[in-house]
């Protein structure tokens, strides 16, 4: 069942139990106790500043289909705006139906002070893990991964959804097929016109967001999502040798991103990547948005021609 597009959720049970704010969703044992019998928690997969993700099965039937369960940290459950964004995330992902976009598995809601939704279980690793482990992919294999990410992004943008936080750790790589799957729509927003461009939930990751997003955290348009694809592509090819390409304080990152040139990135090419291919990726990260690829589809066509 999809949440209503007009629904605004307001937490109700948060203050009814004084122990709610002492719960620690990062603890597998506590998660197991509080989600029983709704879910059986198998293990914790990861945790961020807003939520934790657990491997779980519905109920206590271990023969049930495994899911990935995203749970908002209980200490944040009283933040009405954050919870509204969480349910907005569920609505937006529910609008998508593409093999390169994470799939909601129907279960979502509020369970004794804990907000959650279940996603299709992906057997694989994140792109950041693949890059960090320096697991080799051939040139054609990398191009195909970038192409498929752009394919999923085309679908997302056709739904007028802007992800706003694309990065290697938010893209899963399915183990058997190497299919990339775009995940974590926690910063996503829906474009409804010019007014919506400045009405997005603030946030993102400095290392992968374009300079205009660093300057205005509420901005949202398709080029915002195209920018990190260029960085992800470069990292997959080993440029730079030690990613990310941009690091330091927000001010230092912004200054570096404002001055990116083709020659600067070509100088980091120690892996023998041909100019035509590297130029496709550089065009995605140019400082001026109007100089970048205007759409994921056009960038996809350009990267496909490099095979």
Image: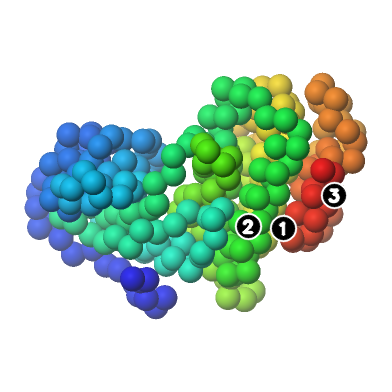
Quick one: 162 or 152, which is closer to the camera? 152
N-term-proximal mark, 3 vs 2: 2
List the residue tagged with mark 3.
305
Q: Nearer the viewer, residue 206 or 190?
A: 190
Question: Alpha-carbon distance for marks 1 and 2?
Answer: 7 Å
Q: Earlier in the sequence, mark 1 or mark 2?
A: 2
Q: Earlier in the sequence, mark 3 or mark 1?
A: 1
Asked if labels 2 and 3 touch by Cβ distance under 8 angstroms, the answer is no
Which structural element holds mark 2? helix
- SS for dot 3: loop
In the image, is 100 to the left or to the right of 88? right
Q: Which residue is mark 2?
A: 153
- Residue at 62% across / 76% down in the picture? 193
Residue assigned mark 1: 296
Q: Is residue 23 visible?
A: no
Residue 81 x %, y %: 37, 61
Identify the residue at image location x=42%, y=75%: 5
Q: Quadrant of residue 51?
A: top left
Q: Is residue 177 visible?
A: yes
Seen in the picture, residue 129 relative to 87 is either above or below; the reply is above
Residue 62 falls left or right of residue 72: left
Considering the numbered disc 1 on the image, is that residue within a helix, a strand or a loop?
helix
Which quarter shows the C terminus?
Answer: top right
Q: Is residue 137 left or right of residue 56?
A: right
């Amino acid at each position: 069942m999809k949440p209503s597009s007009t629904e605004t959720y307001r937490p109700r049970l948060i203050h009814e139990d004084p122990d709610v704010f002492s719960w620690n969703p990062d603890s597998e044992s506590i998660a197991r106790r509080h989600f029983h019998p709704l879910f059986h928690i198998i293990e914790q997969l990861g945790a961020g500043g807003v939520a934790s993700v657990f491997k779980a099965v519905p109920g206590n039937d271990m023969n049930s289909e495994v899911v990935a369960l995203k749970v908002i940290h209980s200490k944040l459950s009283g933040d009405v705006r954050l919870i509204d964004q969480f349910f907005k995330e569920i609505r937006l992902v529910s609008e998508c139906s593409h093999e390169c976009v994470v799939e909601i598995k129907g279960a979502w809601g509020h369970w004794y002070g804990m907000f959650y939704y279940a996603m299709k279980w992906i057997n694989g690793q994140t792109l950041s893990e693949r890059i960090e482990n320096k697991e080799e992919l051939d040139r054609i294999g990398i191009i195909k991964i970038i192409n498929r990410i752009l394919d999923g992004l085309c679908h997302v943008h056709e739904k007028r959804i802007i992800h706003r936080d694309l990065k290697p750790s938010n893209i899963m790589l399915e183990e058997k097929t190497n299919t990339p799957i775009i995940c974590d729509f926690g910063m996503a927003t829906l474009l409804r016109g010019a007014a919506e461009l400045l009405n997005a939930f603030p946030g993102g990751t400095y290392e992968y967001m374009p300079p205009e997003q660093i300057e205005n955290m509420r901005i949202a348009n398709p080029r915002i999502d195209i920018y990190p694809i260029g960085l992800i592509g470069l990292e997959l090819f080993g440029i730079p040798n030690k990613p990310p390409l941009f690091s330091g304080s927000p001010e230092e990152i912004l200054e570096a991103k404002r001055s990116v040139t083709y020659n600067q990135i070509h100088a980091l090419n120690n892996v023998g990547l041909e100019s035509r291919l590297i130029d496709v990726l550089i065009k995605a990260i140019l400082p001026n948005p109007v100089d970048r690829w205007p759409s994921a589809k056009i960038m996809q066509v350009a990267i496909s021609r490099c095979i």
